[in-house]
Image (cartoon, rainbow, N blue to C red):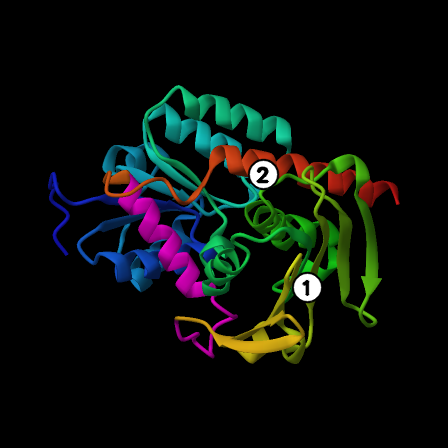
Amino acid sequence: MNWEDSNNILNIGIIGAGFAAGVHSKALKSIDCSMRQYIFDVNDEIAKRFSDEYDCKAAKTLDDLFDSVDAVIIATPVWTHFDFVRKALEHNKHILCEKPMAQSYAEAKEMCGLSEITSVICAVGFNYRFFDITKSLQNEIKNTTVEEIHLSIRRLFRNDWRRDETSVLSDLGIHLIDLLSILSGGKIDVDCCKTQMKYINACDYESIVKGYTDNNIAFCLEAARIDNPKDVRFFVQIKCDRKIIKYDSRTMQIYSVTEGGKTQMKSLSNEINKEDFFDFYDSIMLQDKEWVAAIRGKNNFVVASFNDGYQSQIALDRILQLNDSR
């Protein structure tokens, strides 16, 4: 592959060579195969394996990466995000930072402040916004008054996720917090939240958060890392003044709308890959596509911003505090 510079080719670096990095690399190739990809990992051997598998160039140092790229995807553990974001902004690079964006709302606030004094595109990886069902839900609730929102996600654990309950809230719960904000049009009223742990079986558990948004919409958020593939699902129920919308990912393409005592089954617009968890890979691809388009100045900013990440982080921190004190 030719790595010579070209003014019309976007060079993107991925920091961290784990699972998420591979998903982003595939997504970027599907968007535009002419984009040049670079990988950096603190472990040179892992970076080399990644570069061989995904046909990208391994940068020897972080400075080498920043010297070679226009934008970076930060796909590393959350405790590293602040430093990588700060360094990327110092080098004036566009950023897509995986969620949660920081370890705390204080870090997230500082990251927002640093980004605001630059002209680069800074986004957070809330890819659930790009689920096909999310678009359908937004269309269904137009011109209605939303009263209640129930969001539930159950995914298989990787490594030792189930041994650390806060990882479920930070990894999966943060997605639900962001989805709640865009579906309700409000923010979680952190002063009226309640949390609990629901044990599913001897080793699996579910974090449950209930409360109200600041625009008085009741909500229930459930996030679980589970052991049984048959229990994997994404569930949504939205109660409005005139109708109830339900979706269960186990039905794949179908969601229901009950209005005036009659239930209508509706189909999602895009086919979901049955080998995938729900709409995961397609949503990453759509998110990354919009981020790249924003960098190129071809669209309005539709990906989650650093401020969106900061607002979700405020709610997450409060929920974690409630969880610790229960």
Mark found first going from the N terminus, 1 or 2: 2
Q: Tag 1, which secondary structure?
A: strand
Residue located beneath label 2 in the image: 79
Q: Is residue 13 magenta-colored?
A: no
User: Where does residue 279 sit, x and y in percent of width and height?
Assistant: 47, 67
The disc at residue 24 is none
Please, what secondary structure does the residue beneath circle 2 have? helix
Residue occupying image coordinates x 57% and y 42%: 78
Give the residue at x 82% y 62%. Answer: 198
Residue 98 location (% of width, % of height): 49, 46
How far apart are labels 1 and 2 at the CA level?
21 Å
Q: Locate residue 214: give its quadrant.
A: top right
Q: Residues within 10 Å of mark 1 (few under 14, many from 20)?
A: many
For residue 314, side relative to residue 284 (left or right): right
By secondary structure, the bulk of the magenta-drawn segment is best described as: helix
Give the extent of the magenta segment: 270-294
Residue 118: name its quadrant: top left
Using the image as rendered, state which of residue 212 and residue 326 is in the foreground: 212
- Where's residue 105, x and y in %? 63, 31
Residue sitting at 45 percent across and 34 percent down?
A: 84
| 306 to 15, vertically: above or below | above
Give yes or no for residue 285 being in the magenta stretch.
yes
Q: Amino acid at mark 2?
A: Trp
Q: Please name the residue that numbered disc 1 is placed on.
A: 225
Amino acid under label 1? Arg
Marks counted in the figure total 2
